[in-house]
Amino acid sequence: MAGTAKCFFVTGPPGVGKSTLIMKVFETLNVSNPNLKVQGFYTREIRQTGQRVGFEVVTLDGRTCPLASSKFSSPESLRWPSVGKYKVDVTSFESLALPELQVREDTDLFIIDEVGKMELFSSSFFPAVLKVLESNVPILASIPIPKFGRDIPAVARLRNHAGATCFTLSVGNRDAVTEQIRSLLEDLLIKH
């Protein structure tokens, strides 16, 4: 049974602070609700000598796995899908992210950072996201902004979902949007 106004999607250009917003909201909610049961993951940049060389997935309890890298050099990685200069390790991503998207009875909140092009190379990822979306559990997720006016079809489906509210983040509104989402989720979690 899908609820209404329980899915909050954050979008905006790369580097505007979507992941930072999600982690701030998560940390604040965790402090004010120490028994909160949160599932999900976030994506973090991997940097070497100040340069971004890839991305890793991090669960909310701190487990990590590679998502994409410009440094993969195994023969197997030559067959992996690419986004720009990054090769996407779909198998690694699925091994960590998909179990985090299993709807459990005691879950209070899902965090998914992000539902983007790299993650969507997994044929199992979007169906898992849809199951979460159709559950009655609140969701905080990030999605990419449409490029050149074109949206990724799966992302457009999420953006246009009846129970979703989408916030477009900018440098000027980051703090206000963070507080607004935190407040909305606090209210939802009290009712949940």
Image: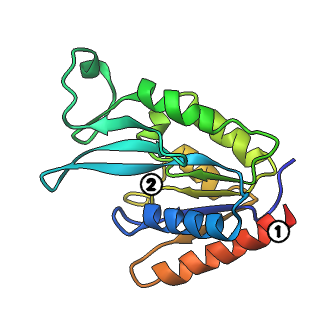
Vertical relation: 89 (above or below) 143:
above
Residue 67 horizontal side relative to residue 143, left or right: left
Tag 1, which secondary structure?
Answer: helix
Residue 14 in the image: x percent, y percent? 35, 61
Residue 171 in the image: x percent, y percent? 39, 79
Residue 125 in the image: x percent, y percent? 57, 34
| Of 32 and 184, the residue lying toward us | 32
Answer whether residue 122 is visible to the viewer in this image.
no
Q: Residue most toward the top?
A: 75
Q: Tell me the kind of residue under disc 1.
A: Ile
Q: Quadrant of the C terminus?
A: bottom right
Residue 29 horizontal side relative to residue 24, left or right: right
Circle 1 is placed at which residue position? 190
Tell me if mark 2 has few (under 14), some (14-19) or many (20+) residues whose alpha carbon lies within 10 angstroms of its own: few
Q: Going from the N terminus, do you reach mark 1 or mark 2 first?
A: 2
> What label sits on residue 150 in the rendered view?
2
Q: Tell me the kind of residue under disc 2.
A: Arg
Tell me if mark 1 has few (under 14), some (14-19) or many (20+) residues whose alpha carbon lies within 10 angstroms of its own: few
Answer whether residue 141 is visible to the viewer in this image.
yes
Q: Alpha carbon of mark 1 to alpha carbon of mark 2: how far?
A: 37 Å
> What label sits on residue 26 in the rendered view?
none
Residue 66 horizontal side relative to residue 101, left or right: left
Residue 2 in the image: x percent, y percent? 83, 51
